[in-house]
Image: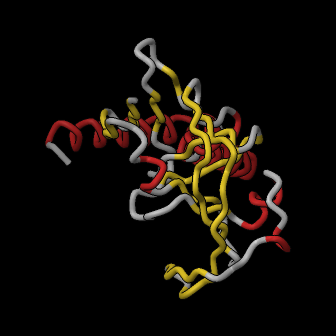
Amino acid sequence: MSSFEIGNALYLILLLVMVVTWYVAQNRRSLGRVAQQALAWGLIFVGVVAAIGVWDDIRQTLRPTQSVITATGQIEVPRAPDGHYYLTLQVNDTPVDFLVDTGASEMVLTAEDAERIGLPLDDLIFSGRAMTANGEVRTARARLDSVALGDHRDRDVTAWVNEGKMEQSLLGMTYLRRWSRIEISDNALVLTR
């Protein structure tokens, strides 16, 4: 904290003490009521501070972050409050939410997302193996008819379906390499074809 900030904090504390002292002096005959009002105002203050502290989370819930297609055809994805980047792609004409994961080699679908896009799990052969943070899981190779992001559509895309429990599908490097340029600039992931 700088000396200027310390000075401002001391000034605000002194001002608060003076206001509280004046209020108590004016209402010294009914100190019980003053204590109730002080408690009420204290709770209101704590509530306002808490609301300010979680405002970004509230705003994100009410209006989720969306990717933006620029005039040059680039896709700009704002960073989410948790520090990750999320994209919604049209997979076989069905919206699927992905976590952009440059540490993942492949595009990996959750079992739930695979079924939603028309890949019956009973028809998949889970012969592959993948190491995850939760240990080894079985995977099945799948062909996606189309994957679209904005105006950019790719056909006959390879993906893997994870048999284990995953919170969200992952968008790995096999898909990201289809873009000529990937950069992170001003808290946004920018994809260029």
x and y, in percent, of residue 130 in the image: 53, 80
Residue lying at 38% horizontally and 33% vertically, measured from the top left: 190
x and y, in percent, of residue 98 in the image: 60, 51
- The residue nearer to you, when weighing 22 against 71, is 71
Relative to 119, say whether 165 is above or below.
Answer: below
Q: How is the image coloured?
A: secondary structure
x and y, in percent, of residue 158 in the image: 58, 56
Residue with the most extreme top position: 71
x and y, in percent, of residue 39 in the image: 67, 51
- The residue nearer to you, when weighing 130 against 190, is 130
Residue lying at 65% horizontally and 61% vertically, measured from the top left: 109
Counting the numbered discs, the total is: 0
Is residue 34 something that shows in the picture?
A: no
Relative to 59, say whether 102 is above or below.
Answer: below
Residue with the most extreme front position: 156
- The residue nearer to you, when weighing 153 against 71, is 153
* Location of residue 137 (image quadrant): bottom right
Q: Is residue 113 left or right of residue 73?
A: right
Residue with the most extreme left position: 3
Relative to 98, say whether 94 is above or below.
Answer: above
* Location of residue 152 (image quadrant): top right
Is residue 164 something that shows in the picture?
A: yes
Residue lying at 55% horizontally and 87% vertically, measured from the top left: 136
Q: Is residue 105 left or right of residue 93?
A: left
Q: Is residue 103 left or right of residue 64?
A: left
Quadrant that contains the C terminus: top left
Residue lying at 38% horizontally and 30% vertically, measured from the top left: 192
